[in-house]
Amino acid sequence: MLTGERRRETQRLLRARGELEYVWLAEHFGVSEMTARRDIDALEAAGEARRVLGGAISVVSRRHEPPVGERELAGREAKEQISAAAAALVRPGDSIFLDAGTTATAFAGRLAMLDIDLLVVTPNLRAAIALSESDSIRVIVTGGLIRRQEHSLVGADAERTVRGYNVDTAFVGAAGVHLERGLTDYGLEEAEVKRLAIARASRVVALADSSKIGHVSLCEICPASDIDVLVTDAPEDDPVLQAMRQAGTEVICTEPEQAT
């Protein structure tokens, strides 16, 4: 990987995870720690990072939520892999909560393709439209205030709807997945809807691409111990994933779909 490409990827990782260690960067890119330090120095000079002991932290606020269009384009293949693996956890006759977010929207498209008997409760307007293409899936859209850029619903009406249903599985996304800090998100209102759905579900499945693993965002959703299954494209040997397995969470690491 060329220096410019590596630094752009380091910048992306730093924005996604919030903090990076030199040791981790060196292992991730297969370079020396000195090279990792120089990359961080360059990002600090550009105003993208601030050096701390052993690594760097992002200068972007934990509450900063990238635009939905940017998130849809980023990691599109990973979202499809996660969706395929998550779909294998769904059975005909299930009732599920489906979260807002780009990964959940990709998952909705996968569920619509399955065309099996499901009841889906969702605050995700894009997901609801995708699910409505299936004749077998009944969709309950929460009320609430529309977050225009996200096309999701929040507020008292959304919370009231979610509180009224006991679902088999809650499929939730997050801005961060951390062993000590648990699932976190950008904003309080969406985090509250997720918390209520988790409380009403018999099983909790977190959907998170690799950029979310180890990252901490502003608002807590739930402790890591509340997650029954984590579906991610992060590598099997990621330390966070290993620790979560040891703590009792089932971790499903996706593989690229094979061409047929």
Image (spheres, rainbow, N blue to C red):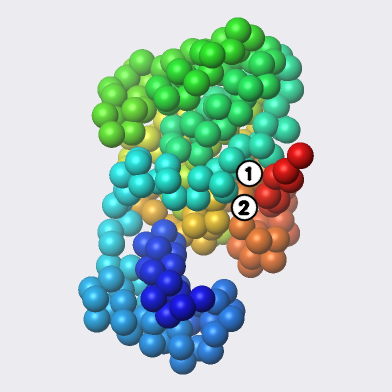
Residue at (72% x, 43% y) in the render = 259
Task: Name the residue nearer the viewer: 160 or 43.
Answer: 43
The disc placed on residue 117 is none
Element marked by disc 1: helix
Task: Specify the farthest residue to the bottom.
Answer: 34
Task: Specify the farthest residue to the right.
Answer: 260
Residue at (32% x, 49% y) in the render = 66
Q: Is residue 16 visible?
A: yes
Alpha-carbon neighbours of circle 1 within 10 Å: few (<14), some, or many (≥20)?
A: many
Residue at (42% x, 25% y) in the render = 126
Q: Position of residue 255 (x, y in %)?
A: 70, 51
Image height check: is 92 above or below 147?
Answer: above
User: Label 1 belongs to which residue?
Assistant: 81
Image height check: is 89 above or below 51?
Answer: above
Q: CA distance from mark 2 to mark 1?
A: 7 Å
Under mark 1, the amino acid is: Gln
Task: Specify the farthest residue to the top.
Answer: 135
Label pair 2/1, CB-CB below 8 angstroms:
yes
Alpha-carbon neighbours of circle 2 within 10 Å: few (<14), some, or many (≥20)?
A: many
**If you read the primary sequence from the N terminus, does the residue marked by circle 2 or circle 1 appear first?**
1
User: Label 2 belongs to which residue?
Assistant: 233
Q: Position of residue 26 (x, y in %)?
A: 54, 82
Q: Quadrant of residue 134?
A: top right
Element marked by disc 2: loop
Question: Position of 249 compared to 163: left or right?
Answer: right
Residue at (47% x, 45% y) in the render = 174
